[in-house]
Image (tube, rainbow, N blue to C red):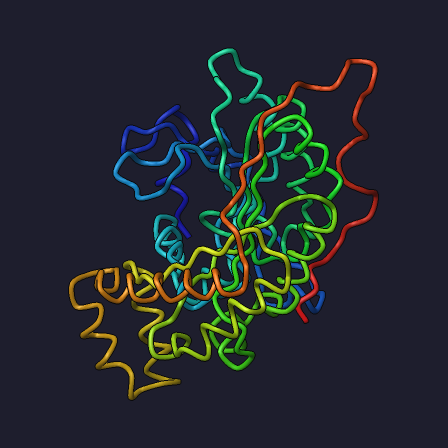
């Protein structure tokens, strides 16, 4: 493994001239002989910064992110973030699923950086690269400290996840929502159990994710659903779209946003390899559909979006409602410390 692109032992910058993200001598590699972590290697690092600015050319509707992990045990065959593992000379296939980089000091960095006079309280998105509530979070417990820091500074944030472990931090989310704008979305692209088992083998089932939506809604935290990805020829039949939107509505989601599968370099190769093994008859159709690049043709995306919006209207899912920022509580009413005393593990089924 090579850390040279991201680390530096003697200078403040890497070969590319950018600030190093962590020190090369600050990497600890661990494995845990427990069923949920068998076959997974964790590389614990002390990062130099936690807030990441999104490149200006990005399609993302936010400017800043926090990513406490790199790599993801969810093992989604389509994950667009696979390419990022190549920056460390790690494999973007099985290596992405099993070699997890953990920024163990992320909570303290977030607290320090949002307290800086140079920080102006911009919205921070989490879970947009890899899932911050993947299985590793049950052991490392980075999110309670991150959420507490954002709460204490009334800094608006949003979370996108497939993980049921977010319910461990329900009280922190509720406290944060009292003082700032908090957005939570759960990713559920389909409810077909066979499709889930093959393309998202390390994630909680779609039913369990929709239980998260129910739980959050039941505690007064509105939760939308990112219906992603809609997978061409495998999850886009009319009856499949209907079943998914119906289940999302029944869970009490505030909104549903469809997103068609996109195949960026790194993810494309791994997905096409998987497709050739499981659905070889579809390889040619995919090559034609994605002949022009990472995204499906506009006509296809619009067709899926229109149908999902029609179904959302039919099942009574309203538009997304964004919360409003509020003042911090009085100094005499401190919040409890983040998290509990024992580690919590993600339940997959």
* Residue pictured at 21% horizontal, 74% vertical: 287
Residue with the most extreme left position? 292
* Residue pictured at 35% horizontal, 55% vertical: 83
Foreground pick, 55 / 100:
55
| Residue 94 at x, y percent in the picture | 45, 67
Residue with the most extreme top position? 117
308 lies left or right of 17: right
**238 is higher (above) or lower (below) than 47:** below
**221 is higher (above) or lower (below) than 329:** below
Image quadrant where residue 271 sits: bottom left
The image quadrant where one finds the C terminus is bottom right
Numbered label tally: 0
Foreground pick, 311 / 234:
311
| Residue 123 at x, y percent in the picture | 49, 30
**30 is higher (above) or lower (below) than 274:** above
| Residue 288 at x, y percent in the picture | 18, 74
* Residue pictured at 52% horizontal, 74% vertical: 243
**247 is higher (above) or lower (below) than 213:** below
Foreground pick, 269 / 19:
269
| Residue 19 at x, y percent in the picture | 37, 27
* Residue pictured at 66% horizontal, 28% vertical: 151
Residue with the most extreme bottom position? 281
18 lies left or right of 39: left
């Amino acid at each position: 493994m090579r850390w040279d692109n991201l680390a530096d032992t003697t200078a403040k910058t890497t070969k590319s001239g950018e600030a190093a993200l962590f020190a090369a001598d600050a990497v600890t590699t661990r494995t845990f002989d427990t069923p949920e972590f068998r076959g997974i290697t964790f590389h614990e690092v002390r990062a130099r910064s936690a807030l990441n600015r999104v490149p200006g050319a990005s399609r993302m509707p936010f400017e800043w992110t926090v990513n406490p992990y790199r790599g993801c045990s969810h093992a989604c065959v389509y994950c667009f973030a696979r390419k990022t593992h190549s920056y460390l000379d790690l494999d973007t296939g099985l290596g992405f699923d099993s070699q997890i980089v953990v920024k163990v000091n992320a909570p303290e960095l977030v607290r320090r950086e949002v307290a800086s006079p140079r920080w102006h309280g911009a919205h921070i998105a989490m879970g947009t690269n890899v899932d911050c509530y993947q299985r590793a979070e049950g052991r490392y417990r980075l999110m309670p400290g991150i959420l507490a820091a954002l709460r204490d500074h009334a800094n608006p944030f949003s979370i996108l996840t497939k993980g049921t472990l977010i319910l461990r931090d329900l009280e922190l989310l509720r406290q944060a929502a009292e003082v700032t704008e908090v957005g939570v979305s759960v990713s559920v692209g389909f409810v077909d159990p066979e499709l889930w088992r093959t393309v998202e083998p390390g994630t909680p089932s779609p039913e369990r994710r929709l239980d998260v939506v129910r739980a959050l809604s039941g505690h007064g935290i509105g939760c939308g659903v990112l219906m992603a990805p809609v997978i061409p020829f495998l999850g886009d039949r009319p009856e499949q779209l209907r079943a998914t939107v119906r289940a999302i509505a029944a869970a009490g989601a505030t909104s549903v946003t469809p997103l068609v599968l996109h195949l960026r370099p790194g993810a494309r190769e791994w997905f096409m390899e998987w497709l050739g093994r499981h659905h070889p008859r579809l390889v040619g159709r995919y090559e034609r559909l994605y002949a022009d690049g990472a995204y499906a043709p506009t006509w296809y995306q619009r067709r899926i979006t229109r149908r999902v919006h029609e179904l959302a209207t039919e099942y009574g899912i309203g538009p997304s409602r964004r919360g409003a920022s509020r003042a911090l509580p009085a100094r005499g009413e401190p919040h409890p410390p983040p998290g509990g005393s024992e580690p919590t593990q993600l339940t997959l089924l």
